[in-house]
Image (cartoon, rainbow, N blue to C red):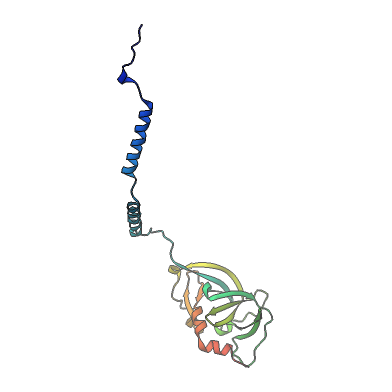
């Protein structure tokens, strides 16, 4: 059996095919690859589209960070951004000629700090002092003082949607310094009102 020799125009030129493929790739790249301006336009359009999309229904609700503490067997909280620190109750010095709710002063790292007993200020039952007592140091601008806590519970986050305006049982002086109450009966105090009460600040810093 004889084999037929290929004609001249039937020879396969591999180098020509390779060059042709490269040319095709370049052409495709020019066709499909957008310019820098085009890329920026596309990205901007995508960003605008995403921004216009509604937030998912299960998006996290806004909340506040607080420190929870105990006063006379009741649970209270104050927003964390008004709290400089929590310190032990040490070297307490009583101050004469001051209101009963001024517990005294402490020396906190060479800083003299007045301490307010909120139980007396809010007319709550006095439980006395124990090793669990802590001083919550409040600060806003140059106003600085400590409040006595029977014990610190924890730092936590509270959803704004969970905060109620008040409860009928919350009466007396503390009602004026109330920020809200949670369904679990955690009383959130308004630290800003405490810190901006001129009578409270002047009295606690009064000279004997």
Q: Is residue 124 visible?
A: no
Horizontal arrangement in the rendering, residue 96 relative to residue 194 (left or right): right
The percent position of residue 163, horizontal first and vertical second, equals: 45, 71
Q: Residue at x 69, y 81 (%)?
A: 91
User: Which of 93 and 176 lies nearest the eye of the viewer?
Assistant: 93
Horizontal arrangement in the rendering, residue 145 relative to residue 165 (left or right): right
List the single residue furthest toward the top: 1
Q: Is residue 17 visible?
A: yes
Q: Residue at x 60, y 91 (%)?
A: 98
User: Which of 96 and 55 lies nearest the eye of the viewer?
Assistant: 55
Q: Which residue is drawn at 56% across and 84% down?
A: 121
**The N terminus is located in which quarter?**
top left
User: Which of 169 and 208 lies nearest the eye of the viewer?
Assistant: 208
The percent position of residue 171, horizontal first and vertical second, equals: 49, 82
The percent position of residue 14, horizontal first and vertical second, equals: 38, 26
Horizontal arrangement in the rendering, residue 35 relative to residue 69 (left or right): left
């Amino acid at each position: 059996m004889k084999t037929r020799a290929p004609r001249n125009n039937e020879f396969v030129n591999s180098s020509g095919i390779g060059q042709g493929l490269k040319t095709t790739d370049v052409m495709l790249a020019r066709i499909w690859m957008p310019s820098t301006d085009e890329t920026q336009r596309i990205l901007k359009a995508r960003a605008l589209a995403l921004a216009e999309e509604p937030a998912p229904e299960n998006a996290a609700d806004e909340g506040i960070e607080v420190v929870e503490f105990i006063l006379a067997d009741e649970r209270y909280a104050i927003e964390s951004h008004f709290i400089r620190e929590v310190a032990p109750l040490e070297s307490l010095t009583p101050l004469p000629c001051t209101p009963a709710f001024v517990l005294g002063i402490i020396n906190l790292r060479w800083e003299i700090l007045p301490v307010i007993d909120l139980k007396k200020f809010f007319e709550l039952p006095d439980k006395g002092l124990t090793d669990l007592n802590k001083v919550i140091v409040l600060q806003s601008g140059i106003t600085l003082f400590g409040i006595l806590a029977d014990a610190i519970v924890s730092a936590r986050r509270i959803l704004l949607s969970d905060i109620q305006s008040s409860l009928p049982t919350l009466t007396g002086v503390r009602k004026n310094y109330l920020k809200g109450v949670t369904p679990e009966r955690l009383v959130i105090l308004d630290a800003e009102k405490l810190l901006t009460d001129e009578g409270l600040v002047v009295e606690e810093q009064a000279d004997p």
